[in-house]
């Protein structure tokens, strides 16, 4: 599972960010990741499929649905996560300024 947590912050070189800023950054980063993952996983799905998925509330059913319609979703999520971390590493100095 992808998480923006202390381990993530250490991995991207932002572990020493001031606490209040770090919490805000982590919240924003997690929201951004959700958007990016949704966009990437949704590639190739019809509008109807996207709406069907949005209506699923049970995590187990959501996982089953993804396995059926987006069998490579785990790879897509991992790719988005790794790319996002690389972007943050590249902008680390700007973020900390």
Image (cartoon, helix red, strand yellow):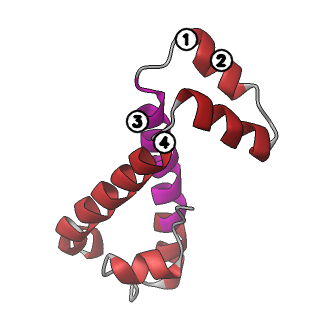
Question: Percent position (x, y) of residue 13?
Answer: 30, 81
- Are dots 3 and 1 in contact, CB under 8 Å? no
* Residue 50 horizontal side relative to residue 29, left or right: right
Nearest the viewer among 43 and 63 is 63
**Which residue bears the numbered disc 1?**
47
> Disc 4 versus disc 3: distance between alpha carbons?
9 Å
Secondary structure category for the residue under label 2: helix
Mark 3 — residue? 40
Q: Residues within 10 Å of mark 4 (few under 14, many from 20)?
A: some
Question: If you read the primary sequence from the N terminus, does the residue marked by circle 3 or circle 1 appear first?
Answer: 3
How far apart are the alpha carbons under marks 3 and 1? 14 Å
Give whichever of discs 4 and 2 has the lower sequence position. 2
Label 2 near label 1: C-beta < 8 Å? yes
Tell me the magenta residue range: 26-43
- Give the crowd class for mark 3: few <14, some 14-19, many >=20 residues within 10 Å: some
Q: Is residue 91 above or below residue 33?
A: below
Drawn side of residue 22 relative to residue 61, left or right: left
Q: Is residue 15 above or below residue 83?
A: below
Going by the image, does 49 lie left or right of 38? Answer: right
Image quarter (top left, top right, bottom left or bottom right) of the C terminus: bottom left
Q: Position of residue 56 (x, y in %)?
A: 76, 31
Pointers 4 and 2 in contact (C-beta within 8 Å): no
Identity of the residue furthest to the right in this view: 58
Judging by the rendered image, the residue that carries numbered circle 4 is 73
Indicate whether residue 57 is drawn in magenta: no
Q: Within 10 Å of the Cα at label 1, are there few (<14), some (14-19), or many (20+) other Cα atoms? A: few
Closer mark to the observer between disc 4 and disc 3: 4
At 32% from the left edge and 75% from the top edge, which residue is drawn? 12
Residue in view at x 56 percent, y 27 percent: 69
- Give the residue at x 40% y 36%: 40
- Number of marks in the image? 4
Q: Which residue is mark 2?
A: 51
């Amino acid at each position: 599972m992808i998480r923006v947590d202390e381990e993530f912050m250490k991995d991207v070189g932002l572990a020493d960010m001031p606490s209040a800023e770090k919490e805000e950054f982590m919240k924003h980063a997690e929201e951004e990741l959700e958007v990016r993952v949704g966009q990437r996983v949704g590639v190739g799905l019809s509008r109807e499929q996207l709406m069907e998925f949005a209506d699923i509330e049970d995590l187990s059913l959501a996982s089953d649905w993804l396995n059926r319609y987006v069998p490579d979703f785990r790879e897509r999520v991992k790719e988005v996560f790794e790319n996002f971390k690389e972007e943050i590493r590249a902008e680390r100095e700007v973020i900390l300024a």
